[in-house]
Image (cartoon, grey):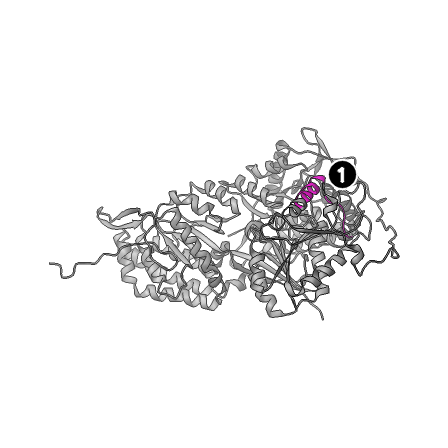
Amino acid sequence: MIDHLPVLKTYKLYIGGKFPRTESGRYFPVNDKNQKLLANMCRASRKDFREAVVSARSAFAGWSGRAAYNRGQILYRIAEMMEGRREQLISELESQGVKSNLAKREVTEAVDRFVYYAGWSDKFQQVFSSVNPVATSHFNFTMPEPTGVVAVMAPDDPSLLSLASIISTVIVGGNTAIILASETKPLTAITLSEILNTSDLPAGVVNILTGFREELIPHFASHMDVNAFWYAADNQNDTKKIQELAAENVKRVCFTKFRTWREDEAESPYVIEPFLEIKTTWHPVGY
Amino acid sequence: MLKEKSISSEQKTTGLDFDGSWEYSPAPESTDHITLKERYDLFINGEFVPAESNRYFDTINPSNEQKLSEVALAEATDVDKAVKAARSAYNKVWSKMSGRDRGKYLFRIARLIQERAREFAVIESMDGGKPIRESRDVDIPLVAAHFFYYAGWADKLRFAFPGRSVTPVGVAGQIIPWNFPLLMAAWKLAPALATGNTVVLKPAETTPLTAMKLAELIRDADLPPGVVNIVTGAGTTGAAIVNHPDVDKIAFTGSTEVGKIIMKSLAGTEKKYTLELGGKGANIIMEDAAIDQAVEGIVNAIFFNQGHVCCAGSRLFVQESVAEEVIRKLKERMTTLRLGDPLDKNTDIGAINSRMQLDKIHELIESGINEGGSVYQSSCSLPEKGYWCKPTLFTEAAQSHRIVQEEIFGPVLTIQTFRTPAEAMEKANNTPYGLSGGIWTDKGAKIFKMTVKMRAGVVWANTFNKFDPTSPFGGYKESGMGREGGLHGLKPYVELN
């Protein structure tokens, strides 16, 4: 006997702080290990991606202009919101085939990942900055600034921990992001979007799509208003094509990926660094 | 060629017309202590060797079109020899040498450059056309300083990257431009060598001589053979370096167009790369700026080195309330700029580096006139021989004009006005480039607000075109990636472990 017929969630995209379906009307099914349907995911199109870039670009000035302290608090808030939804995230991972103990560990580590990078928000600048003792009568200093709009293709596994890593490292530096979630385990990405959407994160700072990497790679790599492309997915056969297309606007291309995405690999300010630009400012010294 | 009648010259209206009573006597720098060989071969594995093809090309003095010397034209086989020499020197000598000893070699090079500074300055001005005042007071001193700075890093690298140890990358292929020939060689060589890499360097086609003189100096310094190899040539030589399978890292300074070609060539390889590409720097004059100082800054921003500067302040933005005054004073100041013999110590504006570059500048000036810009050129006369361009500015320039969008790489300034700081920033950032920028204001708070909003890698506030080995340099967006100079300039040449 069923005392409550479950109300199933419709998984949609996350663009500009809203949850639209793909404009293309297409979907792809995600099944559990018994081949039973878990969800029909949106199969995002080029147009969805371009909408997401527009959102990310318009969110950039506001997000990069926030105080570092404020960005840190919002990252920490994401961890708080995740903590409250542990059970949901764990069961979603399990339904997508992650063993129970591993799912628990992954969610724990994903929460901790946001806490870890929340702490970097007002510190990486100090690590990567310098005051430069120039020989002329000038005050000269160098500090990092965000690269801008960063497009990311996330790996399939570990779907949640890698995504938590990607989001936190990209946005802690003041960038905004468009991320294509794991192709095989996309459910938790959309649930995480709901968490982001209730964590005081301004709309458009993080945009999450689901769909097919192969189809979207040329659009991610070639878009002229994307400043950096992080291809963190496992299949790296496409690196040549990505770099060729990225050259059109001298896009920063990053192929950083980790075997486990656990703390010993993925927790470091040097993971933030590929999405930072270095600015040097000069001013004369004198009366 | 330019239509002379379409260009206004308003010398008589200026307050700085000395009416001929302040004649300058010629003050040429002596060249009698300069010796140039009739031809220069490639510098590979510590020796000067001819190119396998035995082909040479002329290098001329752009101020009189006279041949100075000829240099070997390296092709893929020569590049291969150079890379093999660099690899062997890397494996057997340089990567095993202590940081202290690497540093001592660099200190030695810095000192040798200081000893021969005047000779290098004179050759730089002869081969490239830049005023001796600049090559003597800016280029060559900075070359020595750059080697001196990175020499000191060689045995201190473990303090440069917190939490990480570093190892060299391997063999670096370095391709440099013609605007600051020896300085760009120093920017490339010093950090690469300090961090334990070996190098194949290609100087620009039109300015190879100081690099070949540097090769002699490097030999005099007893640097182990193969650590630095210098191959002269043209675009195909550069392509052979970029495409060589045993090169681990490419460092390129040059145009955005070529930078994109290099990025594409490197696609799918494991090679690291840094690119220092073109620019279209915005120089913003606020109404509360010290106007006379700002005018000097504008002149330095765009006419330094004939405007052959990737970080030149080539787009001037002036707040409306002071635009008339700034433009009037700027025009006056332009008439006092002395154009002519690069070796004359009073020369402000030297020769354009090549016929090709002069044609490109003229083509863009014409487009500016045709698109509706209002052009003004200083009234100076041009020498009969050589490549020359009068200091030029455009008022009535619009955001859509090619002269506002494209890098001219010559002494050509566009002027636009604005009302609010927000409008200035909007216009300043409306470009695919992001190398440099300038802000002129007496208000500190305004400086910090605007320098942070400017999407560019180097920002000068109340100054322009200053350089120092301790100061990182490089671009945002299509102006490239990676930094040269300072602590940040070490990063492209190391692997973090």
From what the image shows, is residue B459 above or below residue B408? below
B221 or A196, which is in the foreground? A196
From what the image shows, is residue A190 above or below residue B40? below
Residue B49, percent across and down?
Answer: 70, 33
Q: How many marks?
A: 1
Position of A70 with respect to B106 (left or right) is left
Position of A201 with respect to B3 (left or right) is left
**Circle 1: element type:** strand
B83 or B301, which is in the foreground? B301
Chain ID at mark 1: B
Position of A3 with respect to A44 (left or right) is left
- Quadrant containing the N terminus of chain A is bottom left
Whether residue B227 can be seen here:
yes
Residue A223, percent across and down?
Answer: 46, 47
Residue B414, percent across and down?
Answer: 66, 53
Instruction: Identify residue for label 1.
Output: B60
Q: Tell me which segment is drawn in magenta.
A: B348-364
Residue A275, percent across and down?
Answer: 49, 55
Query: Is the residue marked by circle 1 packed among few (<14), some (14-19), or many (20+) residues within 10 Å?
Result: many
* Residue B359 lies in the magenta-colored region: yes
A115 or B458, which is in the foreground? B458
In percent of the image, x 73 and y 54: which residue is there? B138
* Residue B469 lies in the magenta-colored region: no
Q: Amino acid at mark 1?
A: Ile
Tell me which corner region of the image, top left, top right, bottom left or bottom right, holds residue B68: top right
- Quadrant containing the C terminus of chain A is bottom right
Whether residue A129 can be seen here:
no
From what the image shows, is residue A131 above or below residue B25? below
In percent of the image, x 29 and y 47: which residue is there? A27
A122 or B449, which is in the foreground? B449
Residue lying at the far left in this picture: please name it.
A1
Residue lying at the far top in this picture: please name it.
B53
